[in-house]
Amino acid sequence: MLAAVLGSPVAHSLSPVLHNAAYAALGLTDWSYGLHECREPELAGFVDGLGPEWAGLSLTMPLKRVTLDVADEVDELAGAIGAANTLVLTGRRTAYNTDIVGIGATLGDVSGRAVVLGAGGTAQSALAALREAGIDDVTVLVRDLARTPELRDTAERLGVAPRIVAALADPASASAELVGADVVISTLPPGGADPLVPPGAGAVVLDVVYAPWPTPFAAAALAAGAGVRSGLEMLLHQAVAQVELMTGKPGPVAAMRTALDAAVALR
């Protein structure tokens, strides 16, 4: 059976490392996982050309939204977010978003007040993960309120009502919003959260950036006594969920983590 990650650019993806390690650990010797450069206009043709030997696809940027257009069925949470990162091809084409699972597994058992940094697709997945965790006191910090329609649409579909604040342009204001937060999820690109002062002891901080690690934001959170999680952990757990969806077998977390750590050490 075949599977692959699609996106553009995609050569840097660690998904083949994770999935092929899973296949080896599961004894799926006739399975292999590759990568293919693919842009939005090319996705439908690529999927239509796949044969019955294909089990599934992982989708990264810029394909997460257009994936819904090539699916026969869309999982509820993927539909609510309006984006998918997984297309299971066994039978009907079914779209899922395992980023939600990845965030939830990375955070662990959390509660209290949450702050999300950013308004993009990962921030929208974070809203879903926080809803699944039972957290309804959520503030989203953004740069420009005019660029939040998709975030607001996602929140409405999820049935949540986050407080959205245009504070990221002012590090002092944004840092003030982080004071006393129990959970902080930064979905900002590299450097985006670096000027902010993170919460301290007792807080759980997830920075989705994982190279280089620790980021200045994560390092400051560690120094302040917060529990810090990296984007690598999220990457691992979303891939574990993909493996289970595609193979029908539980993803071998330990084997996948070992392969991921080894690959990162070589970069």
Image (cartoon, grey):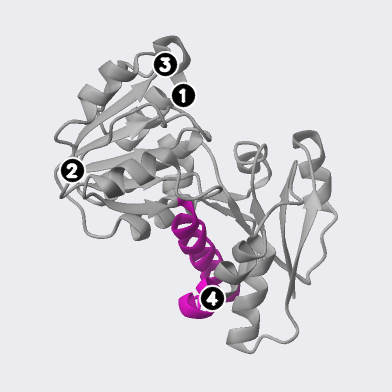
Q: Tell me the kind of residue under disc 2.
A: Asp
Residues at circles 4 and 2 in contact by the CB criterion of under 8 Å: no
What SS does tag 1 mark? helix
Residues at circles 3 and 1 in contact by the CB criterion of under 8 Å: no
Q: Tell me the kind of residue under disc 3.
A: Arg
The reply to whether residue 69 is visible in this rendering is yes
Residue 198 appears at what percent x and percent y?
A: 27, 36
Relative to residue 73, is residue 138 drawn left or right?
A: left
Between 83 and 127, the one lying in front of the other is 127
The span shown in magenta is: 231-257
Res. 143 mark: 3
Res. 258 mark: 4
Of the residues under marks 3 and 1, which one precedes in the sequence?
Answer: 3
- Mark 4 closeness class: few <14, some 14–19, many ≥20 residues within 10 Å: few
Of the residues under marks 4 and 3, which one precedes in the sequence?
Answer: 3
Q: Is 198 rendered above or below residue 195?
A: below
- Residue 165, magenta (yes or no): no
Q: Tell me the kind of residue under disc 4.
A: Thr
- Residue at mark 2: 182
